[in-house]
Amino acid sequence: DNELTSMDRAHVIHCPAAKFIPVIEHLKEAAKYQMQVDNYEVEKFQMMLQDETLLIDNTWKVFSEGFELFLSSFVKAAEEDENFDSEINNFLSQIIEFLEDFELGGTTRRRSMKHIAEPASSLNGLLA
């Protein structure tokens, strides 16, 4: 049953599937490598979760990098836009207005919703 068959190189080269064997081997090795990288990252993440100081340090690092990016973008926008101050004032006033209208207990009341509802009711009075 364990017979060894040999073939000439010329016979192998003429086989239509022979040219795909190096590509298939390359893909298989790339998949093995990617699995090793993924396993390493999972083990590294699990070690970080087990050690609270690493988790806190990593969380702070990610937060500070994001905050630095936000701050640099904010400063760049302020330098480039002439109306930046008025736009920020408008944005902050809308946030303050929203927070003032927000009531604890799950109910919200917004002035903008009242303003939208009032013209519709006044139109009904005018059309009657």
Image: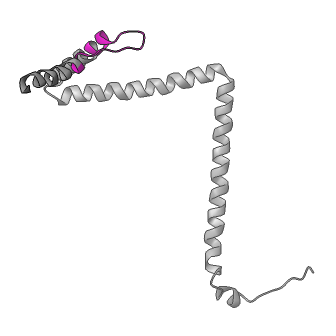
Q: Position of residue 109 (x, y in %)?
A: 30, 14
| Residue 78 sits above or below residue 108 on the image | below
What residue sits 68% from the left and 30% below the top? 47
Q: Position of residue 78 (x, y in %)?
A: 21, 25
What residue sits 64% from the left and 46% below the top? 37
User: Which residue is most to the front?
Assistant: 128
Query: Which of the 4 quarters of the picture holds residue 65?
Result: top left
Q: Which residues are magenta?
A: 97-113
Say left or right for 65 vs 71: right
Query: Which of the 4 quarters of the picture holds residue 44?
Result: top right
Q: Quadrant of the C terminus?
A: top left
**Residue 11 part of the magenta-drawn span:** no
**Residue 110 part of the magenta-drawn span:** yes
Say left or right for 119 vs 15: left
Q: Position of residue 9 (x, y in %)?
A: 70, 87
User: Which residue is most to the right?
Assistant: 1
| Residue 53 sits above or below residue 28 on the image | above
What residue sits 62% from the left and 19% below the top? 53
What residue sits 58% from the left and 20% below the top? 56
Say left or right for 112 vs 43: left
In this view, the residue in front, 63 or 118, is 118
Query: Which of the 4 quarters of the picture holds residue 10?
Result: bottom right
